[in-house]
Amino acid sequence: MIAEPAHRTDGAPQAGAEVGPRSEGARPGSPTVRLLPPGPDDRLRFRRARWQSRQRLERQLHDGASLRISALALKLGVVRHHIASAAPDLDGSIDDLQDQLHAVLQELREIAGRIYPTLLDEAGLGPALRGAGDRCEATVRVQAPDRRFDPAAEGAAYFAVADLLGALGPDSDVAIVVGDDGGALVVTVEGVPVEYAGRMLDEVAGLDGTIDVTGGTGVGTITARIPCA
Amino acid sequence: MRVALAEDGALFREGLLMLLQAAGHDIVGATADGDALLDLLATEPCDVAILDIRMPPEPDGGLITAERLRAKYPDMGLLFLSHYAESHYLMRILDIGTEAVGYRLKEKVGSVDVLSDTLDRIRDGEIVIEPVLAKRLVERPRGEKKGLVASLSERETDVLKLMAEGRSNNGIAGQLFVTPKAVEKHIANIFGKLGLHADTSENHRRVLAVLEYLRAQRDDD
């Protein structure tokens, strides 16, 4: 498995970069080198790489563990076919094992989806946001172009909006419009409490994204704009 | 039945071949991608082609291959297998064809009975939809339909789920251990409550009407 890079707080000096006298300085003769804190470009590159590694993790779950378990489910079916008449008890146990394999796969799919949604990888923001809309309580409409944006921008936009949808009740009626403005990915979410704007900023700020809010203090419109690589 | 198969995961392909053999089907061939399957089927006819959705040609070679197969051999049944039961893919599959198509989770066809039942129904022209997905469609319909679907009785909800799986009246009757006549009555009640006015004389149209209803969204999709 590829380990996910540790989370760093944006803007703060990197703790690992502070080389104190207790570490390097303890060895006489070797010069102490202080790493420069990452510049804005480095941080952006780091964030984009993180999204790409998430995408790879999702594919690894799909191509590795999931495929292996699915194949096992089929092979159990073959075994059952060969012993069915002789051992009815075994038949039931295999049924049970196959049900458990299905449950494990559903859990793996859930994990894969939290790392990077398969639909986002395969089909883009429109289908992925519609999927998120289906799973939440609120009524959600999505308008999105077929064109694709870079995986980092799509990932950040997806999680910013999906988290927001998950927090809404059944009375909410939300309209989401995905668009492209001079190379930036723009997502407009209408009909949501504007107090959620801060949480959306957390998701998009790392990619130099911005959040605009219209509609005062109650229900309004939040617009996220994320520059693409 | 004559069956062909395209799946890029060698382990799964092997398992499925073993299961198809155990079920007594005649395997025309198995390939690791859609293009190779097309080449194969140019000389070897088959009744149902089994396709992994996510395989070469990337990204979703199963769907592209299916479009080509449907254009070339309109009578050939198509069974899509996937790790994901998503309504997004269901809609794309129904765009390719609304007859003799199936969409199932990979690990859910793991018995000779289920696999053969799925293949038989497809060969007979039915739509076969993964029960996990049918259940989700019925339990989480889009938008304002939530209230209407919630007004159905428990039995009617069961019937609706089986319809969303693509089952015929006789198929539903068999699953619920009731007479086809009782199923007819339930379906009339369901259509009344949901305000659906589709032509109710034919199974197939009815299934499509139910799927469209559960999925219908206003301006997109």
Image: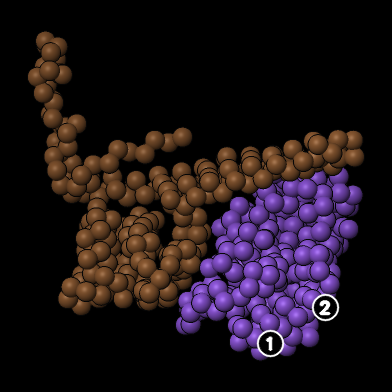
Q: Pointer 2: what residue? A: B181
Task: Give percent across and percent down for residue B108.
Answer: 69, 51
Q: Pointer 1: what residue? A: B198
Most foreground residue, B23 or A95: A95
Tell me if I can see residue A225 in this picture: no
In terms of secondary structure, where does tag 2 sit?
Answer: helix
Task: Give percent across and percent down for residue A30.
Answer: 14, 15
Find out whether the residues at labels 2 and 1 contact each other: C-beta distance under 8 Å. Answer: no
* Left or right relative to B220: residue A159: left
- Is there one chain holding both mark 2 and mark 1? yes
| Residue count near mark 2 (Cα–Cα under 10 Å), binned few <14, some 14–19, many ≥20 | few
Name above or below for residue A5 compared with residue B142.
above
Task: Give percent across and percent down for residue A9.
Answer: 20, 44
Amino acid type, label 2 = Lys
Give the colour in which the image draws chain A. Answer: brown
Which chain's residue wears label 1?
B
Its colouring scheme is by chain
At x 59%, y 79%, the residue is B213
* Left or right relative to A11: residue A8: right
The quadrant in which residue A38 appears is top left
Tell me if I can see residue A184 in this picture: yes
Amino acid type, label 1 = Ala
At x 57%, y 77%, the residue is B151
Task: Give percent across and percent down for residue B32.
Answer: 69, 49
